[in-house]
Image (tube, grey):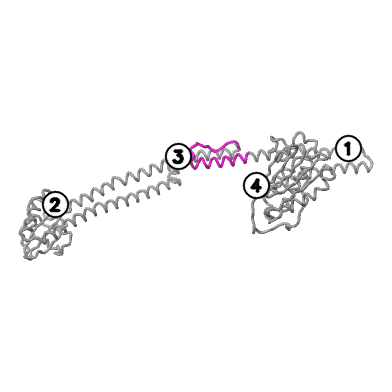
């Protein structure tokens, strides 16, 4: 990244703003320290000289003179001033040439300028002084040189100057370093994204293992890319399977029609050939219809038809629809229903879901077998169980039976192309219903768990009226 791009980056701007904020905070802290230090020392000096003036003003005249003389002689650093003046302003004792003209005689501390005795020092000095009138009309003046306070202020100001600039520079350097690191990580992400867009779908965003924001984002994006790759592979495989499964019936249709045309058979044989061709075309159309149905459901376009429904009523209707088929195959179809709470979903799709599972159970149950459908609402929540005593589903195939066109090798002799359970899985996913396969020993148990299903009470109801139902698409 070029320096101009670095300076325009959001990270550097944020670092600069933080540096400015840090500098302002440091300035406020130093200002507070300055105010506390200089102000506290000033107040201490003012309280001290005010107390001395008040105390000595109450003493006899000779004691005041002695205090002034002692105060002056013991001040080796020439910081303290003390003087006693008569009522006419003439100096009696002390180290001030004259009483300051601008100093009020009110016992309060004021800033004034004084002329010290000729000792080679400055002619005029700024002091904090207090003047009090004694009982005999004389004046007592006590002052303190302000040079000490000025030096203290200068030291604090110098510390501020020396500390603020490095602090700001350090903040900017830290911001520059963070910007450089973020830019390097961002470049890695951009390069990986460019390779992915060029068709390298197995490429993934870099993860350094630091657990920072970039790593967390990369992990999420990589999971998304894994899912996209899986879906693309599934679509590719599905396309191949569709081509294979459609080619077989269409090839048979063409061969029959070609044979009938070549033989110039009687009308009856031509009609029979046409009937068989129509059966093959119907099979191809059924595959296409089922795939379009699955796509529509997976796209979530049917949620507009959701409403409060009675699951028991849906299950009873599906059982009633398939009871004649079970009787024709000499299979006992038994129904057990418990009262359950209403469920929010699409009645027609749930009817199709339950019907496909019952049809699938009847298809794999041998003559003389039994299929049991039960609905319960216990501690585990609302569960619909469909159990049969057929061959069952091996444990290693239970996850694959929901994949489109998957058929076990032992099921090849049974009619179908493997779309019935895929359609059921799409409807279940739309309603957030879990499908769980189990072993009935012998046979298979399919459970529909409605615990985690979405509920949208009060939502607008659209689509078919809640009381209607359509016959489910037969399991393929």
- Against 413, residue 355 (above or below) is below
Marks 2/4: CA–CA distance:
90 Å
Which one is in front in this view, the residue at disc 2 or the one at disc 4?
Answer: 4
- Estimate the spatial distance between the alpha carbons at disc 4 and disc 1, rounded to whole Å: 60 Å
In the rendered image, which quarter is residue 235 located in? top right
Q: Which mark is residue 79?
A: 2
Q: Is residue 389 above or below residue 381?
A: above
Between 339 and 162, the residue placed more toward the observer is 339
Q: Nearer the viewer, residue 413 or 256?
A: 413
Q: Which residue is mark 1?
A: 259
Q: Residue at x 88, y 37 (%)?
A: 259
Q: Position of residue 174 (x, y in %)?
A: 39, 42
In front: mark 4 or mark 1?
4
Q: Which residue corresponds to the image point at 28% horizontal and 45% vertical from the top-left?
A: 162
Task: Specify whether residue 362 is painted magenta.
Answer: no
Label 3 vs label 4: CA separation? 51 Å
Q: Mark 2 falls on what kind of element?
A: loop
Left or right, 346 with reference to 129: right
Magenta stretch? 201-229
- First in sequence, mark 3 or 4: give its number: 3
Residue 59's disc is: none
Q: Which mark is residue 380?
A: 4
Residue 181: image tag: 3
């Amino acid at each position: 990244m070029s320096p101009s791009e670095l300076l325009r980056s959001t990270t550097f701007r944020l670092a600069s703003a933080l540096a400015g904020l840090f500098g302002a905070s440091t300035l406020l802290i130093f200002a507070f320290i300055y105010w506390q230090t200089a102000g506290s020392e000033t107040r201490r000096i003012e309280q001290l000289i005010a107390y001395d003036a008040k105390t000595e003003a109450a003493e006899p005249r000779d004691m005041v003179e002695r205090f002034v003389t002692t105060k002056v002689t013991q001040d080796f650093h020439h910081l303290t001033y003390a003087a006693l003046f008569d009522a006419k302003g003439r100096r009696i004792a002390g180290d001030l040439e004259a009483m300051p003209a601008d100093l009020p005689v009110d016992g309060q501390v004021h800033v004034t300028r004084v002329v010290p005795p000729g000792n080679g020092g400055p002619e005029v000095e700024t002091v904090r002084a207090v003047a009090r009138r004694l009982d005999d009309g004389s004046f007592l003046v006590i002052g303190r040189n302000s040079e000490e306070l000025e030096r203290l202020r200068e030291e604090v100001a110098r510390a501020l100057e020396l500390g603020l600039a490095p602090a700001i520079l350090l903040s900017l350097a830290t911001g520059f370093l963070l910007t450089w690191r973020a830019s390097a990580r961002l470049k890695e992400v951009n390069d990986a994204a460019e390779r992915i867009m060029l068709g390298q779908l197995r490429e993934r965003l870099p993860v350094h293992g630091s657990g920072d924001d970039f790593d967390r984002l990369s992990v999420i994006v990589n999971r998304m890319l894994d899912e996209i790759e899986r879906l693309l592979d599934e679509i590719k495989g599905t396309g191949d399977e569709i081509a294979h499964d459609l080619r077989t019936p269409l090839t048979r249709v063409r061969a029959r029609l070609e044979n009938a045309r070549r033989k110039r058979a009687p009308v009856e044989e031509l009609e029979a050939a046409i009937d068989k061709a129509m059966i093959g075309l119907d099979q191809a159309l059924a595959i296409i219809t089922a795939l379009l149905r699955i796509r529509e459901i997976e796209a979530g376009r049917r949620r507009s038809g959701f409403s409060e429904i009675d699951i028991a009523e849906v299950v009873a209707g599906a059982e009633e629809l398939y009871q004649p088929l079970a009787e024709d195959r000499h299979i006992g179809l038994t129904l057990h229903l418990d009262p359950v709470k209403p469920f929010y979903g699409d009645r027609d799709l749930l009817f199709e879901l339950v019907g496909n599972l019952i049809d699938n159970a009847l298809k794999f149950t041998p003559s003389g077998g039994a299929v049991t459908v039960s609905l319960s609402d216990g501690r585990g929540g609302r569960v619909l169980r469909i159990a049969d005593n057929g061959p069952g589903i091996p444990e290693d195939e239970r996850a694959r039976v929901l994949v489109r066109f998957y058929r076990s090798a032992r099921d090849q002799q049974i009619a179908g192309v493997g779309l019935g359970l895929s359609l059921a899985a799409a409807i279940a996913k739309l309603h957030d219903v879990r499908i769980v396969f189990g072993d009935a020993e012998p046979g298979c148990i399919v459970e529909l768990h409605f615990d985690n299903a979405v509920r949208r009470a009060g939502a607008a109801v659209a689509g078919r009226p809640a009381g209607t139902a359509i016959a489910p698409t037969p399991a393929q």
